[in-house]
Image (cartoon, grey):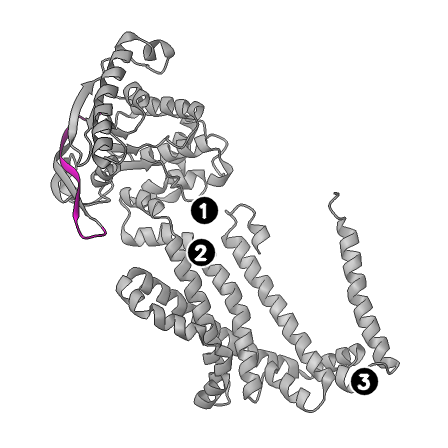
Amino acid sequence: MIRLEGIGQTFLAADGSRVPALAGIDLAVDAGEFVSLVGPSGCGKTTLVEIIAGLQKPSAGRVTHGHAGQNGAHGWAGYMSQADTLLPWRDVLDNAGIGLEIRGVPRPECRRRAAELAARVGLAGFENRYPHELSGGMRKRLGLIRMLAYEPEVLLLDEPFAALDAQTREVLQNDLVDLWRDFRRTVIFVTHDLMEAITLADRVCLLSRRPAAIKREYQVDLPRPRTSLEVQFSPEFQALHQAIRRDLMAEVDWQKAHQA
Amino acid sequence: MKPPARAAVLLTRLGLVLGFFGLWEAGSALGWLDALFFGRPSAILADFWGLVLSGQIFIHAGVTLQEALTGFLLGSALGVAMAFWLASSPFWEKVLDPIIMLIYSIPRIALAPLFVLWFGLGATSKVVFAFMLVLFLVFFNTFAGLREVDRRMVDAVRVMGASRRQLLVKVILPAITPWVLAGFKSGVAMSLLGAIVGEYVGGNAGLGWMINSAAGLFQTNRVFAALLALGLMVVALNQLMGRLERRALKWRPNSNLLS
């Protein structure tokens, strides 16, 4: 369970003026729920995820979660962005095990547990390879298991697959859903791709234009697995896609009109 | 085009080097080259061997090496420390930036006579001189490395719950290692340069002193013998640094091309 209460964020622009980026975001995500966040480009999705991850301090509001007692300490969340943030000097197992290592788990144990996860996502046989020796898809998979290895309560994913080609992205989406099903973590997934948002999530939250607030939420009651074409071309899926798209475009158009 | 055969490259190289020394030897034997100014390879080797047997060469090489390495260690330590300090303090970085650039832009070789004046003819002036040369090199390299550390890489590990200390040990230090090692590598060469130049300007021991005083006495063969010792020392140190670098950076793609 994670709860955002009135999260606001204001940046100081170069000319000294205050630019509001987020204006009172309220959101509650149940334990084990998969929520997608979509919104117009530049609306502050990444800012919001960084606030939840503890990388930014919000100017208003607060984030509460099950481990509230830790008070500001990180480590309850897993975080993955579009960027390749694997450590190039560590092999696959040492990369995957770093979260455990930080918690004081001895290295052999870290590597043993990392190896189990690596095998699950098809990285068996690559345990001692360095990141530069892996394909883009393998690196992302390593990123996923690195995040899962220390068993965080919540996974924060900020367009994690945006840099991948369409084919690899679909494979990774399946991997993610499989891991989510087996580990039952809470997931907050930011994307600009509506198909991706609907296919993966239990609930899609649409953020408004800047300063962003939650404009609308859409429950996704489609049967899983959903990656097959039958589901994605089903009337229910299409209707949902259209509805979100219409609302999203309204925000984008407003933004365009008022920037001119 | 076919890549050149290794054996052909080696043989041609050997031929060129032998040819050069053969011509030199023949030239001075036949009187085309004045041996007083140009020396003679066989005499140089004989002189070198004599210096080895008497142990003199080890004494002087030892003096130079000690001056250089002391300067190198002090300069490296302070250079790394300064880089960390300024990278973590934007205020002092802003304050000191033009001052550092000003000191850096002075041709520091030209300061050698001053150092001898201040710190005397002994080893101290050479150590300080080598230190000055190494300090900036290691500082700039380390500072550039710290600037290049990918924030997102650090953030990713920070979210996992890493402490500042863990971020330093597990992310930042490994990330800047290539930069620091590059600084050390040129720093070793620089420190030798510093010690030698310091000995030229004013000294009473070391290979630089040996070269300078032999040149003053027209002992050309002795100059070359000391140069030979110096060359061997540089090669050995470079080998050592290269090995260290390859071991530390074995994770890098094609790290052998960089050394």
- Say which chain tag 3 marks: B
The crowd level at tag 3 (other Cα within 10 Å; few <14, some 14-19, many 20+) is: few
Lateral position of residue A222 relative to residue A3, left or right: right
Residue A108 point in image, percent of width and height: 40, 41
Q: Secondary structure at mark 1?
A: loop
Are the residues under marks 1 and 2 on the same chain? no
**Numbered range of the magenta stretch:** A14-35
Q: Residue at x 40, y 70 (%)?
A: B101
Q: Determine the CA span between mark 1 and mark 2.
A: 10 Å
* Left or right for A245, reference B214: left
Q: Nearer the viewer, residue A204 or A118?
A: A204
Quarter of the figure with the N terminus of chain B: top right
Looking at the image, which residue is at 83% across and 71% down?
A: B22
Left or right: residue B172 versus residue B201 is left
Placement of B121 over or under A8, stated as above or below: below
User: Where residue B214 sits: x, y (%)?
Assistant: 67, 87
Going by the numbered disc 3, the residue's amino acid type is Asp
Q: Which residue is mark 2?
A: B177
Instruction: State the residue position of label 1.
Output: A89
